[in-house]
Amino acid sequence: MTDTLSIEDLRGILVGCAGGDALPDDIADVSFEELGYDSLALIETAAALKRDRGLVVPDDLITEARTPGELLRLINDRIAV
């Protein structure tokens, strides 16, 4: 079983998939739109989660998340199953 992801883990994945080294310190409640991330960046994030961690998060679920905090909860809920 994979350990849960932290917000810092998610930050690294997001930066690796779509750039954005200048992300604010506390990204949990900042909208992806404000961060400059679109649905393609989130789909790339889903691909990285599958490739690097063996975690499958369907595209339709991952693109429903509006903030990194929501996405983190979604990911960790899938890990817990």
Image (spheres, rainbow, N blue to C red):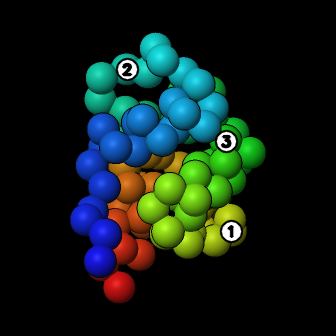
Screen quadrant of the C terminus: bottom left
Q: Mark 2: give few (<14), some (14-19) or many (20+) Cα within 10 Å.
A: few
Q: Secondary structure at mark 3?
A: helix
Q: Which mark is residue 24?
A: 2
Q: Secondary structure at mark 1?
A: helix
Q: Is residue 55 left or right of residue 28?
A: right
Residue sitting at 55 percent across and 72 percent down? 56
Q: Which residue is mark 3?
A: 41
Judged by depth in the image, the label closer to the viewer, 2 or 3, is: 3
Disc 1/disc 3 C-alpha distance (Å): 13 Å
Residue sitting at 34 percent across and 43 percent down? 9
Q: Quadrant of residue 20?
A: top right
As displayed, is residue 20 above or below residue 29?
A: above
Q: Is residue 47 left or right of residue 65?
A: right
Which sits earlier in the primary sequence, circle 2 or circle 3? Answer: 2
Residue sitting at 40 percent across and 44 percent down? 10
Q: Nearer the viewer, residue 2 or 57?
A: 2
Which sits earlier in the primary sequence, circle 1 or circle 3? Answer: 3
**Can residue 43 be seen in the rendering of this structure?**
yes
Judged by depth in the image, the label closer to the viewer, 1 or 3, is: 3
Find residue 38 and report its horizontal and vertical position in percent: 69, 39
Q: Which residue is mark 1?
A: 60
Which sits earlier in the primary sequence, circle 2 or circle 1? Answer: 2
Find residue 66 and report its horizontal and vertical position in percent: 53, 49
Q: Secondary structure at mark 2?
A: loop
